[in-house]
Amino acid sequence: MELLNGERFVLGTCYYPEHWKEELWKEDIRRMLDTGIEVIRVAEFAWSKIEPTEGTFTYEFFDRFLDVVEETDMKVIFCTPTATPPAWLTEKYPEVLNVSKEGVVYRHGQRRHYNYNAPIYQELSARITEKSASHYGGRKCIIGWQIDNEINCEKNEFYSESDTIAFRKFLQDKYGTLERLNEAWGTVFWNQTYTAWEEIYVPRPTYGDSTNPHEVLDYTRFISASARGFAKLQSDILRKYIKPEDFITTNGIFGNLDNHAMTKESLDFMTYDSYPNFAYMMKAYDEADAMKDRKWSRNLAEVRSVSPIFGIMEQQSGANGWNTGMAAPTPRPGQLTLWTMQSIAHGADFVSYFRWRTCTFGTEMYWHGILDYSGRDNRRIQEVKQVYEKLQNMKEISGSLYEAEVGVLCDYDNIWDANLDVWHGSVEKVSKKALFAAMQHSHTPFDYVYLTEEQTAENLGKYKVLFYPHATLINEERADLLKKYVADGGILVVGCRSGYKDMNGKCVMDYLPGLLAEVTGTDIPEYSFIAPDAGEVYVDWDGTKMKAQVFADLLEPLSKDAKIEATYVSDYYAGSAALISNSYGSGKAYYYGSAFDEESAGIFLQKLGVARPYQEIVTLPEVCEVSVRKKGDRKYMFLLNYSKEAVTVEFKKEVVDVESGQAVSGKKILDGYGVMVVCVR
């Protein structure tokens, strides 16, 4: 495998030979190589170039292009073109088209307008994958394959007749009998009981759009399973034809999709499309949003949870926008480098820029690449060259792993439930945002840690502190895993609204927090949203005040090892416990009765001793991010300045500037949008 091999960083770009005259190909490839670009991605939207009409296959176009490529050292990632079915297909087989919840068919003309479950689309997708792989798979310039493009992007809900039929099959496989399904969904409520499988549909419009929440949770799981099955359909075919050393990936990550399971089933690693410039969208720009482009570090942490070392298939290089209401400015000088290094700091060893040339037509004609319409040399291509030169002095960092002592626990069941349930989602949204901001501003690296079936207490034990902001849906297996982590010496922090649902999303009749009561040592006799007329509700933790957010669980200690750490000091909850700690084995669990804001999250980090783990090495302002990748006994510290203004950083110990090889200590200036990478031994 020529990417992610731990030997060096590799730059690439996305290229569309079908958009350009053939006489440009050779010159473009030469210029790419001169710029430092070694890999191109092609063909993700080019089905008609291989199958122009049904059953007629022609390989000449990409053969000619690959012949030109193979005259050089350029390498290729070839794509299956199933993200944009051709017009002949959607016209003859309209059942492949996706449908809105209201029954409106999404017609040909955009992309990703198909549904995964139409049998004919599965058949034709399998055939184009097989034809492409069997013909091109042996080409020496091809080093890997991308399945489809941005699976579940644009739309991640599907309501066609094919989806209803497949949904019924999914439920039959899961529950076996209607009796079990009716019990799991609580269909006795509002007289929804099903007596035949044919009575079940994907969710449909209802008065007030209120539908059975347990059905919708299973429907979301079904969407994920459908997308994963579509990826595996293609991956299984590709494995038969591609060279043994070539990889399979896809570019995500998107909603209503278990990306961890998809990667395990079908991919060698995940790649991501990183567009921090979305933070500067003209219509949506929020000057008060302190995170701005730093928010993409949160997304990169999500990707890293799937693939500790990953690739970027599309990295921001120019202004972005469609002709339909989307527009963002050209990256300022230095931002292209900053965003590239942001990706690398979080674990990317391959970065591919979108795109080489800016297209002169179509919906994405304002989505700029490295080159503008004319193709002339410009500031951005010079910056890409500088990135390449910078990375030549950083080869030793490739293959290193991101280091964090703090983890934020996640699982898809709770993510999907929070998207569906306003009670759950209202606390989840604010806490996730707050925890990220607190760790960014306190320079505390963290990981997202998913509770997959493969997750172990040993792996959780790598983290001094784990936050599980709102573990609403919980089962015995996950509860036992958390008990083992704490008993072995870990520190677990759980937020409000935890433990009150089973895995079907039904509220439990246990004393809350249900299965988490033992490890947290907590009882919750009463709870409430913080009323609009309550004003600001505060919590006192040993003299430190923090503001409760959204919800208040009123707590009581449940065991002799449980201790009240903080109490509410506002409204009728005043005097009630707001935070309980419980010694459990060699570790400790905390139950916090509210959602987090940035200040309270920061207080937890500080009091639990995990904030600013590198402050003895370097101090720097909040506008900067610190990320650390580790390899052997060496730590590589990335300092990223997201401000356009220069800032001062101070090294309290001598470190080595990786790019220059020079020793560094004391105060240094980090330019606006500047990046510095140092080695700490």
Image: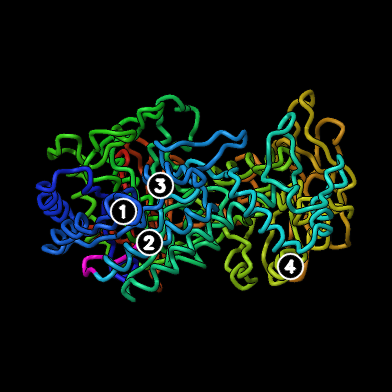
Which residue is tagged 3?
89
Q: Is residue 107 above or below residue 3?
A: above
Report which residue position mark 4 lands on.
477
Pick the quarter of the image with the N terminus.
Answer: bottom left
Residue 399, numbered circle: none
Residue 140: in magenta span: yes
* Contact between labelled residues 1 and 4, with CB atoms less than 8 Å apart: no
Q: Amino acid under label 3?
A: Leu
Magenta part of the chain:
139-145
* Among the 4 quarters of the image, the one containing residue 170: bottom right
Q: Residue furthest bottom?
A: 244
Disc 2/disc 1 C-alpha distance (Å): 11 Å
Q: Earlier in the sequence, mark 2 or mark 4?
A: 2
Establish if 124 lies above or below 648: below
The residue singled out by tag 2 in the image is 129
Q: Position of residue 468 (x, y in %)?
A: 67, 54
Q: Secondary structure at mark 2?
A: helix
- At 44% from the left and 27% from the top, the residue drawn is 285
Tag on residue 51?
1
- The residue closer to the viewer here, 253 or 487, is 253
Q: Nearer the viewer, mark 4 or mark 1?
A: 1
Query: Which x, y percent locates residue 93?
Result: 46, 46
Q: Position of residue 438 (x, y in %)?
A: 56, 44
Q: Is residue 336 left or right of residue 184?
A: left
* Crowding near the residue tagged with mark 4, few <14, some 14–19, many ≥20 C-alpha atoms within 10 Å: few
In which quarter of the view is residue 330 placed? top left
